[in-house]
Image (spheres, rainbow, N blue to C red):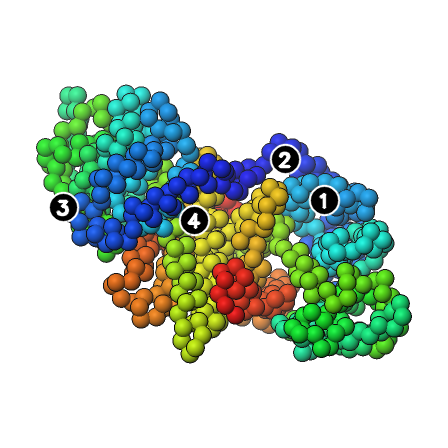
Amino acid sequence: MDFSYSPEDEAFRREARDWLEENLPESWRATQDTLTTREDSFQISLEWQKRLYKRGWVGLTWPREYGGGGGTLMQQVILSEELAKARAPGIANTLGVGMAGPTIMSFGTEEQKKRFIPKILSGDEIWCQGFSEPDAGSDLANLKTRAIRDGDYYVVNGQKVWSTMAQYGEWCLLLVRTDPDAEPKHRGITYLLMDMKTPGIEVRPLKQMTGDSEFNEMFLDNVRVPVSNRLDEENRGWYVAMGTLAFERAGMGQAIMFKQVLNEIFRLAARTKRNGIPAIKDSTIRQKLAQCAIECEIMRLNSYRSLSASLKGGPPGPEEMFSKLFWSEMNQRMTELATQILGIDSVIEGEKEAQLWQYRFLRSKGNTLEQGSSEILRNVIGERVLGIPR
Amino acid sequence: MEFTLNEEQQMLKGIARDFLESRCPKAHVRDMLTDEKGYSPELWQEMAELGWQGLMFPEEYGGTGGDFVGMAVLIEEMGRALLPGPFIPTVVYGGVAILKAGTSEQKKEFLPRIAQGELILTLALQESADRFDAEGVAMEAVEEGDHYILSGTKILVPYAHVADYIICVCRGRGGGDAADGISLFLVDAKGEGITCTTRTAFDGRKLCDVKLDKVKVSKANMLGELQGGWPLVETLIDHGYVAMCAEAVGGAQMAMEMSVSYAQERIQFGRPIGTNQAIKHKCADMFVNVECGRSIMYWAAWAVDEVVAEASLAVPMAKSWCCDAYRRVTADSIQVHGGIGFTWDHDLHLYFKRAKTLEYTFGDSDYQREIVVRELERQLALG
């Protein structure tokens, strides 16, 4: 048991810090808090990704032959901590680097890896996701978007929903049905990589309760996808997709990000009055602040546990199974606490800061729904971890 | 960066699990509920033979040179088995106090005998149930030749009725700040002028009122600095908190496992009750509570052991989370078990009661959260 960093780790941390000091413009810091349009923030993220890529810091642990940095997992962790501390914007190709890349690395052919990975890391090709459908949400295996083989192509027809980044996406991770009679249903699903420039694709943004649009509906009308863009074999797509979901881990960077949000809430509580005294002097608020602080710390520690297991090359620890369940609910409590501190100011038009917390509060309602609802995740823990029957 | 148990610790965990399953079954825990001593001297001796009391002591004092993280591993298993008795008072309060503050004569005199299972120690701090801070210490130690004379009443002293030595937290004359003027003494528990009244907590733990009437203690038995003993008390309480957290994690783990088994086996409406999400999700939440407790408890154990600044946050955070988690998990376990979980014959109430006792020992979770906020206000220069 040792929670300290080695001298080599600390040296790398200084290197990262110095580089960020020099290369991250002040106006790009904390863009998610200051910019109003998604378009501006996307452009900054794209520029930022290209800078990081040149330094070898997008896909730091990925092999150099595919454009990665060839670094260690520990360096990746330290880099993401420092990025979070510097309030660096996210990269533009989140889905590409977070999902498409790892999936192609695990399931792709050598040709596919060489074709796609470098451009994923550089941000030259932005990826989006086409999994959910109107009748296939939590029950993803019920998806009906049909792909019929026609020579060297699949011809795809159907409708996707909640397609993240589809408005910017140049390539799409697409799940399609290739065997409508498969029993169980998940054995008839195939995983395709779809060029978004292919004729027959229509993308319509979905307006969220925040007023913003991160997700889309996607209509597919006789879209022709080459068979060479299939991942793994036909009707094996479900297993590829489950592998993809395993890559959606909450990392250290995210834990540090929450810690910063927490510090902001503490400062907010110190300067906002509630019944004539600073909110931070209110004993009820203090209890909630402490509880959020404890949960943030636990999230960081759980990430350390995962990291430690990975460093040892062992199987993922139990804490990985509930990371997302934990932080999504924690984030709702944190952002709600901030609105409680602000009181009525958090729900009416006005000051920028109050608007920011309003946005974060509303956005957090999506956290317990996206990428597996809390109910589904509790089922998964109950069934797969604890062995309780379905 | 290493957040895993090493090979030695894993071995210790396995040995402790097996030993306690066979030597500390629930029948034993129940026997001890009404036993006058509240622990089994035979079992105490067997534990000493396994090296448990001396786990943290250097080899020269008859120990095996382990660290506090290893001790947390062991105590987690004791919590799982609900081991009754004075292990934490003897080893975590008594042992750590002598290790940290004892003279080499005191170490030579006490540590090997603790390790051999020959001595039981305890800590006498509180004088009223509502506080455990320095200001609450009124018991006087008056210098007289080569002795001190101690008078006053201590309460909630764990297992004082079977202790050989009681570490008494006393006040010297003329202290200004409440934390100034605190001295600690190793008091012979069977000495003249001491009366001990035993009270039993609902989980079977013995907590005693100890009255000292002009008790003579040799200067050689002063522990640590004269009038400067309060930091040592804080260190002992921190170690105690971590030990409580380890117990809580082990106990909650067991309650969770019992609930999961019951959810798998109990049939109603023709299927296992665990197929109902109302039950399954409670079990999933138990898992999250327990694993998060384990993460934060080992962090606190490490921080206390390494004496790093992080301990000032890690300890109250861990105490708050682990004790809350133990209460939530055991309460939900009873709910999952239905009527059988409410009976005296079922073991769950033993865990439920242990959780409650731990929760209220040295400050409940609200108290700990207040400490957390104060510390963060200090770190962020707010307030």
Q: Residue at x 41, y 67 (%)?
A: B265
Pointer 4 residue: B318
Q: Mark on residue A10?
A: 2
Q: Find residue A102 and report its horizontal and vertical position in percent.
A: 73, 54
Q: Are marks 3 and 4 in contact (CB under 8 Å)?
A: no
Q: Residues within 10 Å of mark 4 (few under 14, many from 20)?
A: many
Q: Residues within 10 Å of mark 2 (few under 14, many from 20)?
A: some
Q: Residue at x 55, y 50 (%)?
A: A317
Q: Find residue B24 and report its horizontal and vertical position in percent.
A: 29, 48
Q: Residues within 10 Å of mark 1 (few under 14, many from 20)?
A: some
Pointer 1 residue: A61
Q: Are marks 4 and 1 in contact (CB under 8 Å)?
A: no
Name the kind of residue labelled 4 in the image: Ala
Q: Are marks 2 and 3 on the same chain?
A: no
Chain holding disc 3: B
Q: CA distance from mark 1 to mark 2?
A: 18 Å
Left or right for A155, reference B332: right
Q: CA distance from mark 1 to mark 3?
A: 64 Å
Chain holding disc 1: A
Pointer 3 residue: B197
Helix, strand or loop for disc 4: helix
